[in-house]
Image (spheres, rainbow, N blue to C red):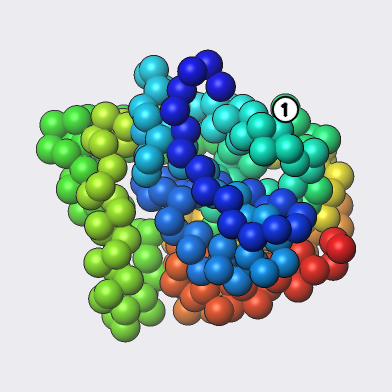
């Protein structure tokens, strides 16, 4: 892995499930899923470069870089295949895994993510936020993103979760946030990748997600052969955190069908 220090956690035993986290969080966002799956699976969680316990890389954090780190990690741990679950930025990295390492995939879970590349307006917005991160620190990213990351129900009824998410964002290195924003802006359009997916696929979306809406996700999910689409109620963009019971109620039976 080119000498980089990438933090990861493995819990449980059984078929591997790799979780790829959202921007601007880290692998701790998957705690509820790790706890639920550890009795029956080897749960692998990885921090992207510059996030959580992972050292920052050199320059732009591409989705391909995250995918290559994930592939290296799985092989390092001795797993020939894994079910891969990516949310938001983690979903973009999962698409890169489909293109680069299709034989590693046993199944795919794409949550609250998009298959299209950023528009010119979207890229400009990320560049502006990256500049704010460098100038004002991670608090600027938290201020701008939290209202869009969390659904209305969470913002109204779960202040403790909103505070937890904010703390995860504040813990991030502002330079790493800027690196990731550049990588998100430069990511490839994955629309054609949908046709390349040849493994069982579950597509999940928070019913209150305003960044990757249910209408949008349900539409492109139809481009994946045999994929199942399901909404997660009372949740926004961080659906696995905002409604972990409903997210897990979709995820666990899906993974059980692979046995």
Specify the quadrant of the image occupied by residue 228.
bottom right
Depicted 231 relative to depicted 81: above or below: below
Q: Where is residue 48 in the image (x, y as percent from the top left)?
A: 46, 37
Residue closer to the observer: 68 or 116:
68
Depicted 201 relative to depicted 195: above or below: below
Would residue 192 be visible to someone looking at this image?
no
Q: Where is residue 231 in the image (x, y as percent from the top left)?
A: 61, 72
> Left or right: 135 with respect to 20?
left
Depicted 179 relative to depicted 58: above or below: below
Q: Position of residue 219 (x, y in %)?
A: 69, 57
> Left or right: 76 with respect to 174?
right
Q: For numbered disc 1, what is the local secondary structure?
A: helix
Specify the quadrant of the image occupied by residue 117.
top right
Specify the quadrant of the image occupied by residue 195.
top right
Tell me the quadrant of the picture where the N terminus can be found.
top right
Specify few, some or many for label 1: CA neighbours under 10 Å numbering under 14, 14-19, or 20 or more. some
Residue closer to the observer: 183 or 41:
41
Would residue 117 be visible to someone looking at this image?
yes
Name the residue carrying label 1.
100
> Left or right: 234 with respect to 133?
right
């Amino acid at each position: 892995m080119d000498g980089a220090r990438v933090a990861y956690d493995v819990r449980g035993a059984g078929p591997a499930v790799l979780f790829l986290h959202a921007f601007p969080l880290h692998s701790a966002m998957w705690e509820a899923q790790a706890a639920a799956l550890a009795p029956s699976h080897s749960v692998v969680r990885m921090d992207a470069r510059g996030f959580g316990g992972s050292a920052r890389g050199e320059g732009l954090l591409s989705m391909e870089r995250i995918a290559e780190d994930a592939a290296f990690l799985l092989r390092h741990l001795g797993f020939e295949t894994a079910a891969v679950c990516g949310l938001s930025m983690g979903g973009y990295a999962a698409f890169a895994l489909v293109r680069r390492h299709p034989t590693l995939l046993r199944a795919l879970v794409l949550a609250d993510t998009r298959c299209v590349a950023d528009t010119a307006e979207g890229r400009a917005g990320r560049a502006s936020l990256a500049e704010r991160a460098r100038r004002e620190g991670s608090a600027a990213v938290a201020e701008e993103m939290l209202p869009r990351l969390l659904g209305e129900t969470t913002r109204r009824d779960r202040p403790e979760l909103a505070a937890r998410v904010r703390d995860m964002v504040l813990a991030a290195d502002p330079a790493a946030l800027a690196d990731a924003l550049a990588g998100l802006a430069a990511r490839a359009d994955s629309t054609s990748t949908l046709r390349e997916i040849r493994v069982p696929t579950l597509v999940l979306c928070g019913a209150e997600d305003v960044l990757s809406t249910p209408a949008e996700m349900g539409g492109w999910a139809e481009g994946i052969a045999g994929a199942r689409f399901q909404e997660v109620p009372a949740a926004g963009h961080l659906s696995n955190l905002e409604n972990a019971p409903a997210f897990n109620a979709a995820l666990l039976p899906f993974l059980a069908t692979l046995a």
